[in-house]
Amino acid sequence: MTTAYQTHSREQIDGILQRMGFSSYLKGYRFLADAIYEVTYDRTAIYNISRIYEKLSAKYQVSVSGIERSIRTVILRAWSDYGDRISDFISVPLRTRPTIKQIVAAVSNGINMMIA
């Protein structure tokens, strides 16, 4: 059962990702949003990102490499179209495409600051 708090957090994650320029129609978008959600509620999960991939793999019946590849694709697409938005949100000038871990950590930190 999903609580109102959890629903609100998912809406916040979607709002942030869309403002950053991530395309919600890409398969990796949902995987990325779910990874952010996991880290938002378990801060230690960011240290073992592969465990998050495994959870998502089981949830969506997709290989772990498929999960990672889809997330990388959605980040690459957003970076090539809206790199300045992503850099602004992360508050660090980025010269190269951010890693999955950087995006997940930045958005989950933003959510946790809004919640606190």
Image (tube, rainbow, N blue to C red):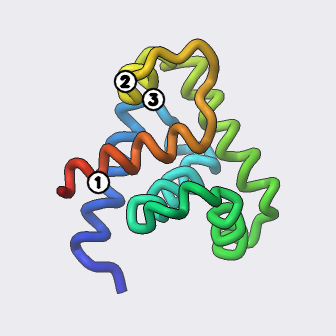
Compared with 32, 73 (above or below) is above
Q: Amino acid at mark 2?
A: Ser
Badge 2 is on which residue? 91
Residue closer to the observer: 109 or 28 = 109
Residue drawn at (64%, 74%), measured in percent from left and top?
59
**Label disc, if present, on residue 112 of the rendered structure:** 1
**Label disc, if present, on residue 21 of the rendered structure:** 3
Q: CA distance from mark 3 to mark 2?
A: 16 Å
Residue closer to the observer: 43 or 68 = 43
Badges 2 and 1: C-beta atoms under 8 Å apart? no
Residue drawn at (68%, 39%), measured in percent from left and top?
72
Badges 3 and 1: C-beta atoms under 8 Å apart? no
Location of the N terminus (image quadrant): bottom left
Q: Position of residue 46 (x, y in %)?
A: 54, 55
Q: Quick check: 39 left or right of 59?
A: left
Q: Amino acid at mark 1?
A: Asn
Q: Amino acid at mark 3?
A: Gly
